Image: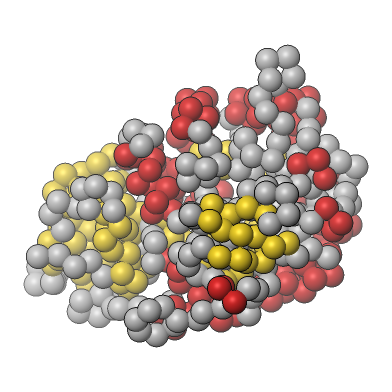
Amino acid sequence: MAASATRAHTKDGPPLADRVRHSGRTRDGGTTILTGARVVLPTGVVDQGRVIVERGRIAGAAHPDAPALDLSGHWIVPGFVDIHNHGGGGASFTSGSAEDVLRGVATHREHGTTTLMASTVTGDLGFLAHRAGFLSELVEQGDLAGIHFEGPFISPCRKGAHSEALLRDPDPAEVRKLLDASRGAARMVTLATELPGGIDSVRLLAEHGVIAAVGHTDATYEQTVEAIEAGATVATHLFNAMPPLGHRAPGPIAALLEDERVTVELINDGTHLHPAALELAFHRAGAQRVAFVTDAMDAAGFGDGRYQLGPLEVEVKEGVARLVEGGSIAGSTLTLDTAFRRAVTVDRLPVEDVVQAISANPARLLGMYDTVGSLEPGKDADLVVLDDSFTLKGVMRKGEWVVEPQVG
């Protein structure tokens, strides 16, 4: 990793990796009532709402003497859920130490992502298997929600920021090797399903309850339909690293948008997608089938400079990451609070639709909607406080303030 990506401390206070485990408690150590805000629930927006947090969970009632925090003029939304994230805070989920990974997790938590799945990039199969075992320990500890393998089973025609020398066809036996190494922590694998072994690998993943995602693909419309019929249910960063939509050869984009079984990832950073493309995806798929993701790399929440993405060198300028050799976009520096604010203020999407795409839908994909993804009694007290311009002001995870709102 380049020198610009090795700082372990923020400008003030302890390392973020420490803060991820030692964030502030709720005000009385047990119960807090948040009042006065506009609260986004699965049933709609409640003005002057109340959110009761008790013992780390959303509660339906509280003692009348419990302390209250007045958040008038703010919004309270569920904590964000990111299913495609390679790192942040100067740390890589593909190659960093446990401290590095926790620093990346902490960086994204401070930007509202209370549930995060670690994504890897293409590497040697043995290395990825070893990495899967390492990351699975952090999944078991509750620091990560799972593992997403993006590569090596992708098309050299649409490789993006992946090393072509390390790509391979999706042999089901090799896919199974990664699943076994993950010890149940693998949640998603991105595949170019048109490659030899692709359809059989999709079936294998579906049988094991792992999401098969179509991405970095050169598939035709017909080949993509076949993959969906075999069990593929996610489009990895739709529009990017796949053939463009054509009127005679519609390619994978049309197949992925039209099928009700598919959730489409969108990177809403203003670089990966033109606003018209995002609007098209929302119009065709509907808010219930969109998942906002970051596809973040080390520089997210850290700054411009030189970084490593797997074996490839990346330069980040003005927040845009590109390969030093060739200039391909290499992930993003996006955090989900920025994606949320842009979706509402630039793309003019309804707040309820953005909450669905950034919290509820990805939580359902991960099989975690019973505990996260919405503000409902019994669920984890994961929430984000936004001001009236949709700028992040507070983050709570499991009833503890990661970023405590300064109000009054």
- Would residue 352 be visible to someone looking at this image? no
From the image, which quarter does the N terminus lie in? bottom right
- Would residue 176 be visible to someone looking at this image? yes
Residue at 35% from the left image edge and 46% from the top image edge: 341
Q: Is 117 displayed left or right of 228 in the figure?
A: left
Q: Residue 404 at x, y = what percent?
A: 26, 70
Quarter residue 315 falls in: bottom right
Of the pair 313 and 237, the residue shown nearer to us: 313
- Reply above or below: 70 against 21: above
Q: Residue 194 at x, y = what percent?
A: 83, 37
Q: Is 147 displayed left or right of 35 in the figure?
A: right
Residue at 73% from the left image edge and 72% from the top image edge: 131
Quarter residue 384 falls in: bottom left
Q: Is 227 displayed left or right of 259 in the figure?
A: right
**Image coloring type:** secondary structure
Residue at 81% from the left image edge and 44% from the top image edge: 155
Q: Is 369 displayed left or right of 26 in the figure?
A: right
Residue at 55% from the left image edge and 42% from the top image edge: 272
- Reply above or below: 69 against 295: below
- Reply above or below: 34 against 172: below
Of the pair 263 and 165, the residue shown nearer to us: 165
Q: Residue 325 at x, y = what percent?
A: 73, 54
Of the pair 106 and 222, the residue shown nearer to us: 106
Q: Residue 285 at x, y = what percent?
A: 53, 29
